[in-house]
Image (cartoon, rainbow, N blue to C red):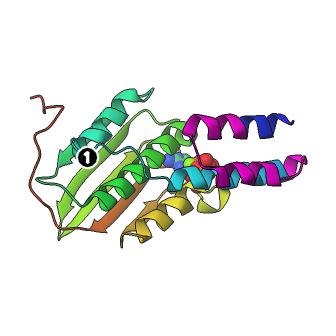
Amino acid sequence: MTVWRGAALTLLAALHLPVAALSLVFACGFGKDESRRTLAKLRDLVRDIRPPVPTGRGLADAVRALALEMVVDIDVDVDLPGRCPPAVEAAAYVATRELITNAIRHAAAETIRVEIGHRQRSLQIVVTDDGGGGADESRGSGLVGIRRRLGTVGGTLHLSSPPGGPTRATMEIPCALSAPTTPFYPETA
Ligand SMILES: Nc1ncnc2c1ncn2[C@@H]1O[C@H](COP(=O)(O)OP(=O)(O)OP(=O)(O)O)[C@@H](O)[C@H]1O
Ligand SMILES: [Mg+2]
């Protein structure tokens, strides 16, 4: 068994993915290129699985908790007086996580900022980093995946990442707010 197949199987086992996903791994050959393609498919599959957005906490607190887990300081600024539907929160959470991961992996940013708000009947999330810019959707599947996932809930991604930076990703998803929730991580003065 190649290292690639082993890694894929470990990933699947950890995620308790269904038999159909396992068959994807076994269906592939032993070649490195084929294994790479299989891993890319698996990554897409994992992205499509409903993410763990705790329904009791809501998007803002889920993003705050995510930010605390990251290796760099991330400012999270929230002005969201209610909840969006679960599908919208889930899509927004996964997309925000990918953008934060990109900023850490690719931008060598010193500052990452996430702004979450609700304007003109849309959830708006802006992720900004002060890294070197140059984000290019043709070089990976993460940004394309964000567009696809946001599209399923009528949302959009606008990406600005000129050479030299900064990178600013603006996501908008139409949504009506329902009753607010009590913050799990209260704002401090
Ligand atoms: N915040 C950023 N700053 C600078 N470059 C970025 C940033 N985000 C993305 N990039 C560049 O754009 C490319 C595409 O990003 P994308 O997220 O689509 O793929 P990826 O992160 O390389 O791989 P993956 O498919 O695992 O997400 C990256 O390879 C990187 O070169
Ligand atoms: Mg990425």
Is residue 133 visible in the rendered structure shown here? no
Picture coordinates of residue 65, whole percent (x, y): 31, 33
* Residue 66 vs residue 131, the one in the foreground: 66
Q: Residues within 10 Å of mark 1 (few under 14, many from 20)?
A: few
Tell me the residue at 30%/55% (across/down): 89
Quadrant placement of the C terminus: top left
Q: Quadrant of residue 92?
A: bottom left
Q: Which residue is mark 1?
A: 55
Picture coordinates of residue 62, whole percent (x, y): 30, 40
Tell me the residue at 42%/44% (across/down): 129
Q: Is residue 188 above or below residue 42?
A: above
Q: Is residue 129 left or right of residue 25?
A: left
Identify which amino acid the numbered label 1 is placed on.
Thr
Q: Is mark 1 within 8 Å of ligand 2?
A: no
Is residue 112 inside the magenta stretch?
A: no
Is residue 13 visible in the rendered structure shown here? yes
**The magenta segment:** 8-33
Q: Main secondary structure of the magenta part?
A: helix
Is residue 13 inside the magenta stretch?
A: yes
Picture coordinates of residue 115, whole percent (x, y): 27, 48
Q: Is residue 82 above or below residue 151?
A: above
Residue farthest toward the bottom in the current orientation of the protein = 154
Picture coordinates of residue 31, whole percent (x, y): 91, 48
Quadrant placement of the N terminus: top right
Residue farthest toward the front in the current orientation of the protein = 19
